[in-house]
Amino acid sequence: MTGGALAFCLIMVTGLVALIMANGLGFFWPGDIYRFTLKDGREIAGQLVEREQIPGSDTNVPGGLFRIKVKQANRDLYGTDFVWIDESAITKKDKPADAILIHRREWGDFIGVIVEVTDAGKSVAKGPQEGLKFLKSLLPQADATLAAIYAIEKGDIGQINYRQDALRLEIKKLEIKGEGARFKKAGIEAQIAELGKQYAIQSARIDELKKKQTANVKLTAAGGVEKELPLQTVVRVISPNTEGVIGKTLIYMERLWEFLSGDPREANTEGGVFPAIFGTVMLVLIMSVIVTPFGVVAAFYLREYAKQGTLVSIVRIAVNNLAGVPSIVFGVFGVGFFIYFVGGGLDRMFFPERLPAPTFGTGGILWASLTLALLTLPVVIVSTEEGLAQIPKGLREASLALGATKFETTWRVALPAALPSIMTGLILAMARAAGEVAPLMITGVVKLAPALPLDGYWPFVHLERKFMHLGFHIYDVGFQSPNVDAARPMVYTTTLLLLLIVVFLTLGAIMTRNRLRKKFAGSAV
Amino acid sequence: MYFIRKPAIVLAVAVALAAANTAGAQTVAVDAKIPAYKPAQGVSGNISSVGSDSLNNLMTLWSEGFQKAYPNVKVQIEGKGSSTAPPALISGTAQLGPMSRAMKSSEIDDFEKKYGYKPTVIKTAVDALAVFVNKDNPVKSMSLAQVDAAFSKGRLRKGADDIKTWDQLGLTGEWAGKPVSLYGRNSASGTYGFFKEHALNKGDYKDTVKEQPGSAAVVQGVTVDRYSMGYSGIGYTTPGVRAVPLSEKTGGKVFEATPENSYSGEYPLSRFLYVYINKAPGKPLDPIVKEFIKLVLSKNGQEVVVKDGYYPLPASVTAEELKKLD
């Protein structure tokens, strides 16, 4: 019976993971491009996505008729990325060797055949083969230019921006104080103007770099439409029909790396998820740092110091019940107490110059972490208490008999002995926190955060900032993106990533626990 | 003029639309008379937007474009439903309030109480709210009364009996007797409110409508569930679903959800997508907000509208909206 239940659970879990992996892992693999010629003379080129039986068709034809879903890309030309084709309408199907797939920075993928590559209006390479070779040789240079522009935008201009913001706040502060404001204000305004000039210099540098972007590639898409793409909009060029397995694997790795380390593009439906990974991990770590001391201290009090009686029992029942409260309730509490009450109070006291724009009085990574800490507090308390209950009475009594005070006994004897249990509680807490989305949605997660909560500007850790989260990313891309068909594989891949991160964080904690156990086993007797 | 009770989008402008018909889908072109965006000097700072989730993607795409023009500007976007925009504008936490429906008079009153003037509304795009069915569904067209009879408990349009199965919509064969499974949006969304007001005549939804957290979820539900019907913005169309042509009156002329029919107001469920801003009359607008709206109403901004699947504004409307900024 019990074995059967366990087996059933395991089958369900592996099934789920397998489903996610099957749907998510194939996302980066460049599939072959087929060209279909239809009965009505139309031509459609694209990658095969799925094949299904037309419902009800098996009544007339034995075995039934099938239709296929093809990713034809070229959203700007055709209106949609995907199209269903009845197999009975196809007269010819082949794999043209010169069909290429281009990943673009905007409008999704492009599938077509190269006509020519031009630079500054002059044709430099004609035809599919030569064009592809030339295009591939030009790309690194174009990428370097883009990287240089990005560096100026994020580095130099970011710096100017940061200082301008600080100065503007300084002015507002002076205005609120109102003393000798005019004299100082003029000085600060001069500084802002000076920074404005520096910005002009930097943006001129960007313009200079943009002048280098002169190369274009002209392609024909299926159906004979011509399209010219500027080279800087091209992320990579793939020729899936001629590429071997090794080449495709390299592309796969490259895209995987882009996914893990890149910034999101096109309203999060393309590009990478690095800010979301960062936000998730940072959230869980801050939550752990907050929840452990609180949970442990509470458990020690309940078990070691408090007089066991009705009151403690009631508290204990309350703590256990807290574990069963729906997470969204914690979220609402977080909004009401942390954000509006504590955060709003902090704003009025310390950041009056920024009002009405709130600093701490709006969702942020600190409030989200605190909410999650509350949510996972019962787990830590309960498991710490369990650990304390398991310590043999003799151990404590021996310590007391040797003349140690109660505090020394708790600190030197009980705490180390309970450490593995505390870690177990923390592991469970982390696993729960990493998967939680509902309370985060109202306490600080956003679709696209302009900056990471950790950066190079003082005070380096910006706990008031909003952040991105993998769980929310899954929700957002899966339920809200207009081009769901194109975004769905991304949902699976992100889910897989979230699972991996949870496993990774938990493994880290388990390893720490094992080390502690060994240490304890050596010193206990 | 600030809010229209019934946004029948009647535009007396012939709009040049290149509707190339390939593979059954349409590509919409931006009105050639709309000028491209020219970045201004001296724009810097932060801007924050709180509001509609239907407009969430559009806002994100616009802000991507805005940051390209002004690398020194930070844009923050939150989209949790149209109802979240007015409080954020009133408290000053957001400068932009995207909404997929017009503000209610109570919301405008709250704003006016705080500031002494009304919020300024900017039309940013045209959306046709579509009734989607599965791609295999042969239903030819529906009248709004039928839509009401399918989705609403109250049936305030009084046009038809309660529609529960597909044969009541004239389908035969395997479809006859199959119950209509309904998909809709959650109550915080402007799409929910608009559909309730304009398709159901403010009647209540049936309890069997499966409320989804996003428009894409509605479309996915209809894709998978063969005997279903759902509503959401036309921008979410995928090849797995089909938008049913609608008629205002039972037996009246049927119109497809196309840009032309939406502009002319003949498609019964077309609407504008708005961005609300806080502009004191007679005072210049914060340059960063002004430039953002200018970008939205430019050729670049309207191309983004097309990219996101909605319909762009005609030049006459963008010109009128731009006047509101001065």
Image (cartoon, helix red, strand yellow):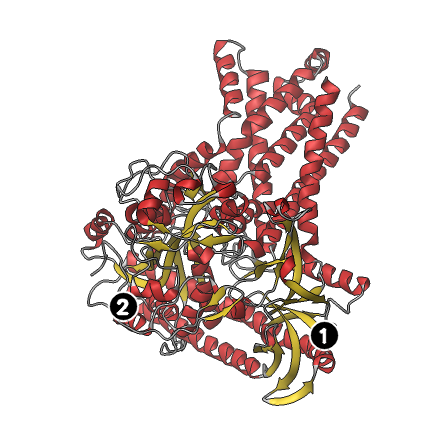
**Above or below A489: residue A160:** below
B169 above or below A194?
A: above
Q: Residue at x 61, y 77 (%)?
A: A220
Q: Quadrant of the N terminus of chain B?
A: bottom left
Q: Chain of mark 2?
A: B
Could you tell me which residue is drawn at 53 percent across and 35 percent down? A373
Indicate the quadrant where residue B262 lies. Answer: bottom left
Residue A215: x, y in percent?
Answer: 61, 82
Identify the residue under disc 1.
A98
The local crowd at label 2, few if under 14, some if 14 to 19, many if 20 or more residues have their Cα within 10 Å, is some
- Residue B204 at x, y = what percent? 31, 38
Give the residue number, with chain letter if any, for mark 2: B11
Q: Amino acid at mark 2?
A: Leu
Residue A173 x/y as whole percent: 34, 58
- Label 1 to label 2, Cα distance in Å? 47 Å
Element on which disc 2 rests: loop
